[in-house]
Amino acid sequence: QIYGIYHKIVNVCLRLADHHLKNYFSSNLIRSLRTAARTLADATSLLVEHLGVFEFRGGGSRTESNPESIPDNSYARSVLLQHAWLWEYCGHFARSFAADGLWRDRGHTCGADLVGLFREVNASCVGVREACFGKSSKVPKTTCSVRASSHGQVSLDSLSGLVILPHDFERIEASVLQKKGCHEAIGAARAILNRKTQIKRDARQVLVAACVCYGHAIDSYVFLAERREEGENCVDSAKKNESDDSVDGLKKNILSMSTGGNGAAPVVAAPLLRQRLGDACNEIGQILLSESRGVLLPQFSPPNDIRLMMANSGKSIFGMSHVSAIMLASAQFWFLDGLARFTEGKDLRNLALLRCNLCQCCKIRANTNVILPGSSEDPSSLGKKKSNSESYLQEAVDHLVAAHDAMGQRDADPVTWDMVSEELAATLLVLGVRRRQSTLSSSSPEPLILQAMRLTPGAEKAIVEPMERSCAIYESLGTPKASHQAAAAHYQLALYFSKVWTCQRDEARTREKLAAAFEHYGAAHRYFFRHVRGNEATFVVLSLDFSNLYSAVSGEEECLSKALQCCLDTRAAFSFPALPDNAMAPALSATMEQIATLSESIEARVSKLLLSLVKIEKGKKSNLKAAATGPKSLLPSDKYTNMYRKVLGYKMMSRNKQSNEQDEGNRWEDPSSPTFPIFELLETLSEGLA
């Protein structure tokens, strides 16, 4: 009878907790959870010390002489279910507090109140765990405890969120830091996190506490599922003391542990709780990922004590890049832990989102000079030609491909599928460009032709295939943004083929590479020609490269005229629409400065091409005059000569303006109509070429 009273008190307290959680009654909620934990501890003590029936064994059974008797393990199941229910509400409270600012405004509570409550509940439930799992607190084999996966670095007494696994720690020491500096970098990372505003600090610590709470609840459900006798349903456990007013959330978690009929495979325990645990892990990982980026920004200023520690370290034992490595390794731990939970619960959408976050971790690694821990493969074993950044980008691609494989097909979730596809295409494009830059480096002392001649078919495929896959994915998406990125992918492919077409060993392959270069340049040029606004600088640079390819193929009039046409097509980039006076923002000014510089390159390129065409034109005239055949009307016109005279006139005008207006030659004169002087020249030359 006493145990029955305890049991009902716990149920009532947890029902009240559900009500208080919905109405921001923080004081009442804390009191209800605290009372439930203490009463559950008293009930466990009663069963263990006084009745001696708290064991997971089939001790008693119903008989005709004693129809009210129940198996001994029903008491243990009842207590463990309430234990799971208690920790579940603690986790809900923590996640709600971290996501909803009304807990501060209406509930008048803070993160320290929640952490204190969870520690008190944990202290009260020690006896329950010892009675259920044994004095060694043996958890199920398939534990979801963050404490276990973090090797004890995460607990209610350690809520910073920084987790450096043993193999990560060894790799950090071996790659970027001395042994002394590694510990100091971890301390600096913890100090930076602790100096955040109280709201950010409370949110992070409470989310870590939520993961601990959900882990306790899931482990209890899993333990019950493992100990359930064949054919027995957990809903029937403690039937004598279980009232008819069970909570819906508890029913869902219990029902998820029941087995299917006819020997069907057991269902994963507590899938909803696993999803919530995965969400909390994802949120913690995003916080740490953001902090790892923030400490690398130029405007970031470390606290004074950390700056002093770095200044006194002599040989710079650690820096902000090392602190970022610590935070990034911790973020990856939380993402991987959340990924495991979503995989267990078969939550395909969140699983794909976690893969995208892991992809971001790999991209940060690829863009930093610090060798970060946690890669699936030792970079030293990848060969000398494959850099660490390429291996990290390949790992990012593998994560995104795994996300697509998990979803199976686009119809499962079109929005998520397209988001993963866009991220995959961007990563493949970066990977291909990075491989091209490392293989054909303009900064290398070796001539480019020697680098290109050493390209093996495998190395060339490793460069071209990612960019072609990226281009195909962008074109399949069909969105305006994807079309822009597809044009960028075409441009990068064109740059590669324009470098290697002159280095082929036979004519067939030379023609193949040259045709590919023209094809990709043409696709990119067509897009940016139709979408000049906002892409002025890109279009001008692309047109200059396209012009250079035409003139490199042949010095004949046909190729040179096409090269000239590419330059003349850029005239739209030097004429901006009418703008109000207040539209001359700093961003627009920076664009104008860039366009002014490019206008000089266009002027020089047009002048050089016209000079070559004038020579060809004069050569034709002299040949015809020497032959003295045909009427004079068949002599070639002075088209290019007249165009070249206009260019010379433009140059003289620009020099006079620079001398009179103190270097104001290539700048816009009227803010209401910001048109560069070269626009009129290109417009005039286009009319003359037509």
Image (cartoon, rainbow, N blue to C red):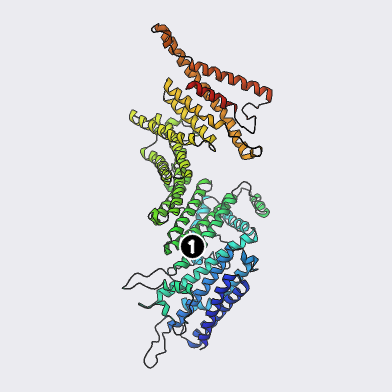
Position above or below: 604 against 27: above
Q: Is the residue marked by circle 1 packed among few (<14), some (14-19), or many (20+) residues within 10 Å?
A: many
List the residue tagged with mark 1: 278
Residue 269 lies left or right of residue 371; in this view the side is left
Name the residue nearer the viewer: 586 or 114.
Answer: 586
The residue that appears at 59% across and 29% down in the rendered structure is 676
Residue 377 in sight in this render: no
Position above or below: 613 against 416: above
Residue 276 in sight in this render: yes
Residue farthest along the left direction in this orientation: 262
Place of residue 552 in the rendered image (x, y in percent of width and height, measured from the top left): 44, 25
Place of residue 13 in the rendered image (x, y in percent of width and height, measured from the top left): 56, 78
Place of residue 299 in the rendered image (x, y in percent of width and height, measured from the top left): 64, 47
Label 1 residue SS: helix
Name the residue nearer the viewer: 304 or 528.
Answer: 528
Name the residue nearer the viewer: 52 or 683.
Answer: 683
Give, as a three-letter code, the residue at label 1. Gly
Position above or below: 561 against 380: above
The quarter of the picture where residue 550 lies is: top left
Residue farthest along the bottom direction in this orientation: 65
Place of residue 91 in the rendered image (x, y in percent of width and height, measured from the top left): 54, 69
Name the residue nearer the viewer: 685 or 551.
Answer: 685
| Image label count | 1
The quarter of the picture where residue 98 lies is: bottom right
